[in-house]
Image (cartoon, helix red, strand yellow):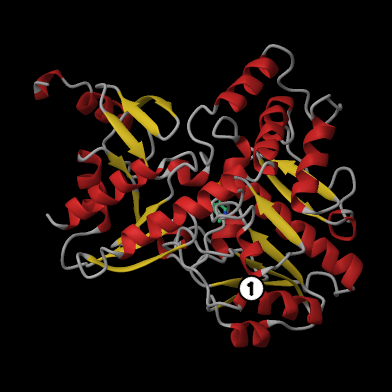
Amino acid sequence: MIEDMLRTPAAVQDAERHTAHNYHPLPVVISSAEGAWVTDVDGRRYLDCLAGYSALNFGHRHPTLIAAAHAQLDKLTLTSRAFLHDQFADFCRELAALCGKDLVLPMNTGAEAVETGIKVARKWGYQVKGIPAGQANIVVAEGNFHGRTTTIVSFSTDSDARADFGPYTPGFRIVPYGDLAALTEAIDEHTVAVLLEPIQGEQGVVVPPEGYLHGVRLLCTERNVLFIADEIQSGLGRTGTTFACEQEGVVPDMYLLGKALGGGIVPVSAVAADTDVLGVLQPGQHGSTFGGNPLACAVATEVVRLLATGEFQRRSAALGERLQAGLRGLIGKGLVAVRGRGLWAGLDIDPALMSGREACERLMERGVLAKDTHGSTIRLAPPLVITEEEIDHAVAQVAAVLAG
Ligand SMILES: Cc1ncc(COP(=O)(O)O)c(C=O)c1O
């Protein structure tokens, strides 16, 4: 195609002109998608190896999810929580069952689920644990990513995320990720919760040392502290199990879920916990106009049903091995490290070779979409519907980019 006739450059410029520059997207303008593939405004196809940061675990426009959305659009879309609607109970019951918890509280974005978890933990601390008013603290990990609200960035260790957004919310203690001794030290009689990602996604798919999550669980039980697992990116099949915590046989007190729960169609997040924890909330103390709306519930119920079959978790585990093995074969050939679980991988590129951004631009030219993070790391998180051949194709393109 003649360069002048492409629609992409003008579309990129147009988008940049009318938005705050809080993202630095790759210069690709997507106009349609199906399964693991997206098509841009110039008709070029790309294998989506980011999957909306795991929001598209079931691929683009999964037929079951699209059908549920269409059917619901024709019936009822919003009631607010001032009234009940006929999609609410099924969603809450089925998600609670998937999580093995008594209750769920639906919200919209991941950050809202995290905020909800923080509020619930604090209230639990005052009402159940008996901590003096205003004294609760929550222990979090260095390198965390839990979202972008003022409270959440208050305990971020990433200066881009945090700088100039103060004054910051107090009540958080930061310890090195994966360090059980530091965590033990940080917990005191006013600690209400330990809030962790079982695998740190934004940090570059950082997997903690074996036994860490198990140790966190034991410690939290021993010290009467809630273990809150932020499974917003790691959960719902991404790592080869429904929850990443399962890989160490660990059940947290509270799951924070988001992203894939909305099936790549609507923002749906949720907190799942037992009655002794989530039961501390009374009417008027927390909520959201759109949280748990009929359209969200209709789609998310189907997401839960897809997960209940176990098929996506099995795919992620089996295909993940292929992806991880393929990528490990590139260590020493442009990659210095590969981390991951299931269909989720963080690749550290030799910084002498190129930046993560440069690698993603070159991958894009080769028809593969991925996202860099923290300088020289690339994250791969393809939809769980990806095939073996497509994985081999993605790995081959990474190899080609590294080979220059
Ligand atoms: C682990 C984790 N928690 C929370 C969030 C925030 O989710 P959202 O962007 O939907 O607010 C993210 C988003 O990347 C995440 O990865």
Whether residue 89 is visible, yes or no, is yes
Q: Quadrant of residue 377?
A: bottom left
Instruction: Give x and y (percent) for residue 257.
Output: 65, 49
Q: State the residue at coordinates (38%, 34%).
A: 19
Instruction: Give x and y (percent) for residue 186.
Output: 66, 83
In the image: residue 335, left or right of residue 313: left
* Residue under numbered circle 1: 213
395 in relation to 52, above or below: below
Three-letter code, disc 1:
Leu
In the image: residue 285, left or right of residue 64: right
Instruction: Give x and y (percent) for residue 237.
Output: 58, 49
Q: State the residue at coordinates (45%, 41%).
A: 51
The extreme top residue here reads 74
Please state, as top left, top right, bottom left or bottom right, where the C terminus lies in the image.
bottom left
Q: Which secondary structure lies at badge 1?
A: helix
Please state, as top left, top right, bottom left or bottom right, where the N terminus lies in the image.
top left
